[in-house]
Amino acid sequence: MLVSDHIAGGVPAQELFSCQQAVKHRPKSGQARLELARASLAVDDPAEAVEQCAKALELQPNLRDAAWLLASLVQRYEVNENIKLSAGGLRAALQFVDVDRQALCKAAIASLKHISPLLNAVAVGQAEDWDTVAQSSLRGKGRKLLQDRLFRTALSHGINTDVEVEFLLTALRRALLAEPERLRDRPVYEFACALIQQCANNGYVFHTTAAEREQVDALKIDPAALFEGQGDSAGDLMLAGLYKPLSTIIDPTLARRGYDRIAPRALRLVIANAITIEQKESEIAMSLPQLTAVTDEISQRVADQYRSAPYPRWLSLQAPEPGTARQVLGNYFSDAEITCLDTPFEVLIAGAGTCQQALHSAITYGKQARVLAIDLSAPSLVYGARMAQQLGVENIRFATADILGLGGISEMFDVIECAGVLHHMSDPFAAWQILVDKLKPSGLLQIGLYSEVSRQTIAALSNDPDWPGSNASNEALRTFRHRLMQRTPSEPGYELTTSMDFFSTNDFRDLALHVQEQRCNLPDIRDFLVSNGLEFRGFILPPSVRQMYCDMFPGDSMPGSLDHWWQFEQRNPRTFDGMYMFWCRWEANSR
Ligand SMILES: C[S@@+](CC[C@H](N)C(=O)[O-])C[C@H]1O[C@@H](n2cnc3c(N)ncnc32)[C@H](O)[C@@H]1O
């Protein structure tokens, strides 16, 4: 971008100019590039900001702030063919667990799809068939795709969310099973290890044919031999690891022998990672406390789902600046209403699942906060507790509990967050009432509930001829997904592929095969708030949507009224596709 385009911009344009000069004088400085990225953003040039962040990381791979900014940019802006992203920079960004690797993985794959070899592989796959392109990728020059280091890093650290790339990866897995001797070739086995990690990341969501299942069952796996350094056993183990968790194939006690003799090295790393995770989680599970029992019939059914399929599946966190809750909550509450943040305060995350939101909140609330994350599902909390250790989050504790049992505990809370939970209970409003009773008089409450209007596509799924029913096996789930992927974009059901939840087994189950789901509307929410003396304090929505609301109701100021939001939703039925997510608190003088 030319600086003259921004002369009118005043200070940001001057800043941009001086950053450009700094880059000229210090072309090898990652920090100078990062400053230029920030200045580019200030003059509304996100494409340049993205490119400069990636270059900064190429020059200085440990520049965490550049990785964080890059991830936050690609969360919001799509990577198109005009953006020239440094592959080395993206690979460096993908090494940080406290930046959104998922957004980076998506950006990496989008960027690779614009250039060969992936561009070519996808074109051939579409024009001919995926098996042909997969087979040729295992030999000769075709292996260029497998050797692409950014492709491998993205598959190792994120979850692919591109349908065509999934067709290709699924075919590559089949091709490896059909030609196991190819695994002796270094580019092939190194890629296979990245694919093993990808399959673990997505919970083995790829479609599997009956023939593949038979072949996998017939594999001769000898993990003990592998730990003794007998390389011959690596091939079959790699193939099995593409279809099921390594922790179910390898006896974890073998780890006592050490991983050093496992060859090849790429496989050693994948195995060590899988077993270490398994061991840490078993250890955490042994000391996870139980706050209340789970006796309600629906709670038990829902608990069963989330024990075997914890949600959400996440691998990294775009960690916020610690202690920035005041800024965030300032959008919904006055300074006087958030004085609880000044002294130690109690936070409840009710139905925390695998705790991505809980850990994000714990960091945002900062050291003064004492956060309690509860859920029906112990495995979900165990996952969250392990990630808390990895991310160094210490102001949070975890306990299994049923929201229905919270009346039996004495603790009261300054802040309660409950997103995506109440609609999985038998009476969401009765459960909401229980949370209200746990809120201190000056407390703040965040609720997330499914919208009847937005969830019409999902609600209609149960009439889909291919829908396998809630409680379907993982095999049936994969088959259903595969059928949806094979539809044309205009056919019902295909639009599910635009959801991130489509691309991993547990999240797809949560999205499309839930054992218990109810939806509500804004008049229901309004009535509940009024009858409980609560005040609506605003939806958590992007600024552009709030602006659309203000354009439609120029006489309103934020947070607007629920009656007007209801009219807004009729006109913009996809507004609350995620959920109705909002803040509320007691009306003044109601407590
Ligand atoms: C869709 S997940 C949402 C997880 C998390 N809040 C998020 O937004 O990422 C729903 C979670 O609510 C939990 N849940 C459902 N009913 C519950 C109840 N009665 N008590 C406690 N947790 C419950 C489930 O076990 C599951 O982990």
Image (tube, rainbow, N blue to C red):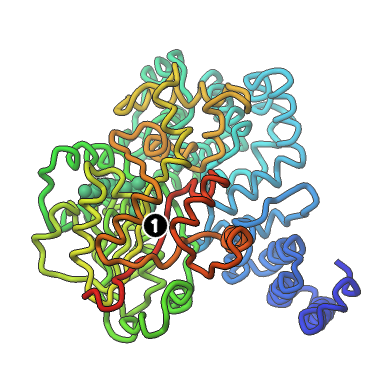
Quarter of the view holding residue 63: bottom right
Please, is residue 371 above or below residue 238 in the view? below
Q: Residue furthest front?
A: 555
Where, quadrant-wise, is the N terminus in this rendering? bottom right
**Relative depth, front residue between 412 and 61:** 412
Please name the residue that numbered disc 1 is placed on. Answer: 356
Mark 1 vs ligand 1: CB under 8 Å? yes
Q: Is residue 160 above or below residue 124?
A: below
Q: Quadrant of residue 2?
A: bottom right
Left or right of 417 on screen, residue 480: right
Residue 551 location, x and y as percent?
63, 61
Q: What amino acid type should be assigned to the residue bearing mark 1?
A: Gln
Q: Quadrant of residue 46?
A: bottom right
| Residue at the (36%, 19%) spot, across then down | 217
In the depicted view, which residue is nearer to us: 44 or 577? 577
Query: Residue at horizontal 58%, vertical 47%?
Result: 154
Position of residue 45 in the picture relative to residue 482 (left or right): right
Q: Nearer the viewer, residue 398 or 591?
A: 591
Residue 92 in view in this figure: no
Q: Secondary structure at mark 1?
A: helix
Q: Residue furthest right?
A: 4
Name the spot of residue 507 as percent of width and height, x first: 41, 40
Q: Could you tell me residue 32's position as x and y percent?
A: 73, 77
At horizontal 48% and vertical 73% (from top left) the residue drawn is 331
Give residue 513's position: percent from left, percent from top. 36, 31
Which residue corresponds to the image point at 66% horizontal and 69% vertical from the top-left? 60
Q: Is residue 341 above or below residue 542?
A: below
Instruction: Inspect this view and state whether residue 286 appears.
Output: yes
